[in-house]
Image (cartoon, helix red, strand yellow):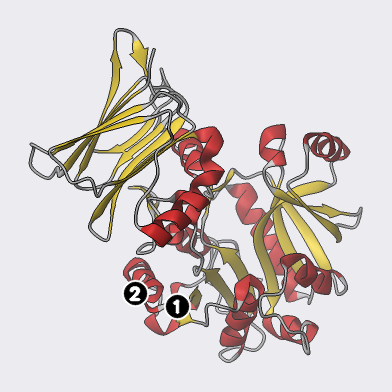
Amino acid sequence: MAKKGTPNDKLWAVILAGGKGQRLFPLSNPMKEKQFVWISSETGSLLQNTIRRFISIGVKPTNVVIITTCDRQTQLASDDALSLGVLSQNIYQIAPDLGYTGAMNAGTEFVSRIDANAIIINSPSDQLIEKNASFKDSMQTAIEYASKGSFANVGVRITDLVTYMGTGHMQYDKEGRITKFIEKPDRELADKLMREGNTACNTGINVWRADRFLDAVKGENLKDMPTDKFMEILMRKDLRAVVGTFPWYDCGTLSSLHDVGMAMGKGTPDHHNVTYGNVKKGGTQGTYCHESYIRAESGHRIEAYNIPEAAVIANFINGKPAFVACAKSESQRMREVAEEFERTGTLKVGPENEVLLTDVSDECAIAVIGLPGAKVVVTKGKTPGVKYNWLITMPN
């Protein structure tokens, strides 16, 4: 087995980049899915961060395969990946109805046509993972399992109860064989499992040898197969848990982007706000924003006052300005907001909120969720590069 970080001709990464990621709306939208959303100047997009992560442990850029499901995703993946050394012919577009398990199978078949005995790392494209020694050791262990014909799932140890309740987990026996998968346990079960100590958060990163996998699923219809049923197939063979202690973030919600920003040192030390873009934040008469993620994409300026624990985003979608202010506790509702926008082209504001449009079209899409009493004022930009000014305030 190659030394950690040394390029390995037998090692491949299949990165699944075909999902929508609607809970990051309006950063993710019908024209740019979550995996292509820029996170910071250091990480680039989520997809770029994922590619670099596996290159750092020995995957050659030419051995990276990116799975997409439409022409737009293929173009966006090319924009992100080719500059990192990924081959254009390795951006593999599949039918959108295959589902997650079908996509992994398609990726494995793609690689097996090049190398039937390849070791394949399968990974989502919407995570941020710190590439520390524990991550590299975990990946090396998983690769060793796969080289011997076993299957491996990479997990991470979680000690925070709230985080534990919000993620899926794998349970394993004394020999490290996975025996069960548990999806987002309630508080009582989460506390019990954490104390028992034989579970780990399932990162969705799994490793197998191409020929071994294709033999294991021969005769199975993997198209849109539920993940738990798919994992049962692998458990009947030999599915191993590899557990590390590396920092891991599932960038599934706007709230999670605040947590990532704080962990990357992007937050203000006094009020723990994370801000990007043309943003003015602060306070009047002693009232301040705190624990908030405030992001203005190009062409927008946001002024936020007295906004607590929220995500405030301004973006353009197909040339239409979209503004979302959402309490972090309501982040999961972004999916229904995104679906409403795709269906109607507009957004609704709660009856407890007020929006004032000044010298602008009323075609702006605005959503305010979980911030009772919040007031939004929209004006045309008066500075170069700014088309819309957004002021959002909360009552004292």
Crowd band around label 1 with a 10 angstrom C-alpha radius: few (<14), some (14–19), many (20+):
some
**Which of 113 and 22 lies nearest the eye of the viewer?**
22
**Secondary-structure class at tag 2:** helix
Say which of marks 2 and 1 sits in front: 2
Asked whether the viewer can see residue 2, the reply is no
Residue 28, by quadrant, is bottom left
Crowd band around label 2 with a 10 angstrom C-alpha radius: few (<14), some (14–19), many (20+):
some
What amino acid is at disc 2? Gln
**Which of 352 and 374 lies nearest the eye of the viewer?**
352
What amino acid is at disc 1? Thr
Which residue occupies 44% across, 55% down?
A: 340
Above or below — where is 161 with respect to 322? Answer: above
Which residue occupies 51% across, 56% down?
A: 126
Asked whether the viewer can see residue 354, the reply is yes
What residue is pinned by disc 2? 75
Position in image of residue 387 (x %, y %): 15, 44
Position in image of residue 111 (x %, y %): 57, 84
What residue is pinned by disc 1? 62
**Which of 387 and 289 lies nearest the eye of the viewer?**
387
Q: Are marks 2 and 1 in contact (CB under 8 Å)?
A: no
